[in-house]
Amino acid sequence: MKRLITLTLTLTALTACTQDQHNQLSRKVVELLDSDYRVTFANGGTEKSWIIKNGKVTSTDKGYYYFWDKNKHYVQTPIENTVIEEIDL
């Protein structure tokens, strides 16, 4: 509920913001929406999973997801072979 109120207030404020202010607020909303995820890469006989605790998974226009795992390792996986699940830790 707290996230919904914050998101609503942010969206209302965005209508009267400059582009720079809009970008700053968008980054803050993303920080508030961080969650726990399980990311699984599967290709043929290879399968690897990572846990992202209170973090986010980002995609690129080049076809990759990237994120920091719970051990603070930077990981990049192809979108087409990756499944992302939100989990409760």
Image: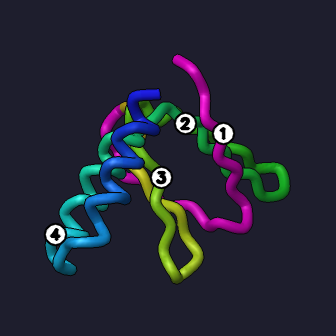
Q: What is the magenta range?
A: 71-89
Which residue is at 24% across, 70% downward? 22
Amino acid type at mark 1? Glu
Mark 2 lies on residue: 37
- Please give the label number shown on residue 21: 4
Within 10 Å of disc 1 (Cα), the crowding (few <14, some 14-19, many 20+) is few
Which residue is at 53% across, 82% downward? 62
- Please give the label number shown on residue 85: 1
- Please give the label number shown on residue 57: 3
**Please, is residue 46 above or below residue 18 in the view?**
above
Which residue is at 31% across, 39% downward? 72
Is there CB contact under 8 Å for labels 1 and 2?
Answer: yes
Amino acid type at mark 3? Val
Is there CB contact under 8 Å for labels 4 and 3?
Answer: no
Residue sitting nearer the eye, 24 or 15: 15
Q: Label 4 to label 3, Cα distance in Å?
A: 23 Å
Quadrant housing residue 43: bottom right
Q: Where residue 67 appears, x then y in whole percent?
A: 42, 52
Q: Label 4 to label 2, Cα distance in Å?
A: 29 Å
